[in-house]
Image: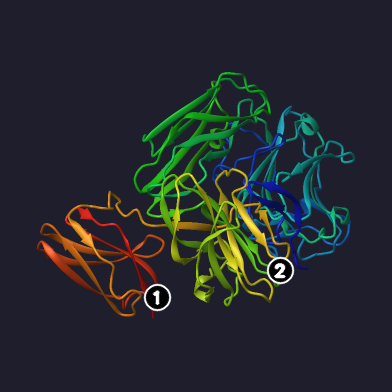
Amino acid sequence: MKKIFTLITVFAMSSSAFGQSSIIKKAPFATKKSVSVINRNMSNNNFSENSNTRSVIWTDDFSVPANWTKASPTGPGLWTIGTAGPQGGFLITNINSTTKANGFALFDSDVDCSSNQVANITTANPINCSANPAVILKFQQQYRRFYDSTFVFISNNGTSWVKYPVNSDLSNNDYCAGNPEVVKINITPTAGGQATVYVRFQFYSPTSMGSNAGCGYSWMIDDVSIEDQLSNDLELGAVFYGEYSRIPDGQQVPITFGAAITNVGAAAQTNVTLDVTVNSNLFIGSFTNVNTMAVGQIDTAVIQTQFTPGAIGNYVIAFAASQTETDGDPSNNVSQNDTVKVTANTFARDNYNYKGDYVWNGGDPFEIGNKFTFANNTNAISVNFVLDNNTLPGSIVAVKLYDTSLVTILASSNPYTILGSNIPSSFGYNPKSVTLPFTSAAALVAGESYVAVVEFLNASGTDTMLIAAGTDIVQPSQTSFLFDTPTNTWFLAPSTPMVRLNVALNVGISELNNMSGIKLSQNVPNPFNKTSTINYEIEKGATVALSIYDVTGKKVLEQNEGNQSAGKHNINFNAQNLSAGVYYYSLTAGKNSTSVMKMVVIK
């Protein structure tokens, strides 16, 4: 059964109309937020706990299938226990749980497509929590939603059950926040102090959920435990640090830091503090909530002091939450691997982690991309994007740049046919980007926003073009867009596609424009096939080098000319080792460099 997209309410925004889309049964992740019932450690993928401070009452790793009973109250399809992962046409990656080699529970909705699925897996024997007045249920999961719901049911007598929603913050086609994602649910109201506790997981996708129900993806569960709820336990949730993971040199703006903090312990916490550092001590910021934080309360802490990145390089951000009380589980209080990178010339919203995809279904072209706002004037030169592994060679694409009206096209590329070498070998690994240059650069104005998109041009076939989506850094709304040809409408994309915009190199990396002492001329001929002549003039004798960059800003060649005397000179440049495409070149003489010039190589 094909997973088609449905278009929902259209509403006005700026000068254009947009809708929200649940998009296709193959689409991306969304940023996760902590909720009052389910507490997610989303800031990193290190799920270790401090076992010396949290008492484990019961645990099961699915190595003994008889510990669980399986039932399907509605429709065909049962949970399975084993090591085999999903097998459907729209499979998701196997769960990467701690004890996956011993087996895990799987409901493979896509295999059992029936349009009416409700399936339970329940502990066969009661769990004694009588000596534990406050308890949590913890498990590891891998899940992707599509017209279904997931629940945990808890019983203290084996007859009556209390429902706890899981993954209720996900939209259609969203994944859970990690693989595995650790989910912790406060089940104290039902299980605390009880001697006969039962746990049930339910996959719920009956016909009442709509015509697309009963044919979702998969839900995998492993390493389930019931543990004491700690008295003092803060959890750092979603963190935010600006809109971009990659910022071109020359476009740096101040960044505000913040994070969601949840009190998941059994006692109120005081003087809850968020501390942030960049590159250990390049920046240090702090915010303290002087009010008492109640049990289950979620607060968003925002540090008022901003940070502006400097030169090209990585800026590693560490977040940490603390309180007056001694935290019983400090492992979920920190996030240490968030990074903003100042690049030579690339703007990106996704976090370069390959997590999902948008798929083109049917015979209609579409466009998808992101909005970028510029602090200073520059020129847009190209767009790069990442493909999913299921993309088929032969897909025809192009890239465009729109102004904020999403009507006026400022730049575009020539059509490009996707090659097998452009496509990664497997989902989630070794993502490959394709870069397409604009036929001519577009001038960008400081303070203005622009939307860079990739356009799929094929007019027939199915499932041939899949644009990857990356893990978002926390994004403002209305920053990713999708254009649907049949309805001639722009829609808000539910998550960030891996579509990035490249601007003219700020090669300097220092003050390169109008640098006195060097004059660099346009290469002749241009475009050229094998060789081209580059004329230059220097006022003083110096060591000269020619640098060649591709459209992503990567230096692909450096040609040393040695010591040159003052005066006019020329370089006979040979492009035999370069592929056809657009390149940029600059000249260094001693400690001075020129601005970049554009050359086009044809084959």
**Could you classify mark 1 by the number of other residues whose Cα lies within 10 Å: few (under 14), some (14-19), or many (20 or more)?**
some
Query: What residue do we see at 77% from left, 42% from top?
Result: 165
Is residue 67 positioned above or below 363 on the image?
Answer: above
Tell me the SS state at disc 1.
loop
Using the rendered view, name the quadrant where residue 79 is placed. bottom right
Question: Residue 137's spot in the image, x, y percent?
Answer: 71, 39
Q: Is residue 79 visible?
A: yes
Q: Earlier along the polypeptide chain: callout 1 or callout 2?
A: 2
Q: Is residue 194 visible?
A: no
Query: What residue do we see at 44% from left, 37% from top?
Result: 254
Quarter holding the N terminus is bottom right
Left or right: residue 443 versus residue 151 is: left
Q: How is the image coloured?
A: rainbow
Residue 89 shows which numbered tag?
Answer: 2
Is residue 258 positioned above or below 67 on the image?
Answer: above
**Could you classify mark 2 by the number of other residues whose Cα lies within 10 Å: few (under 14), some (14-19), or many (20 or more)?**
few
- Mark 1 and mark 2: span between their CA atoms? 37 Å
Mark 1 or mark 2, which is nearer to you?
Answer: 1
Residue 580 shows which numbered tag?
Answer: 1
Amino acid identity at mark 1:
Ala
Using the rendered view, name the quadrant where residue 477 is placed. top right
Query: What residue do we see at 21% from left, 63% from top?
Result: 545
Amino acid identity at mark 2:
Gly
Quarter holding the C terminus is bottom left
Tell me the SS state at disc 2.
loop
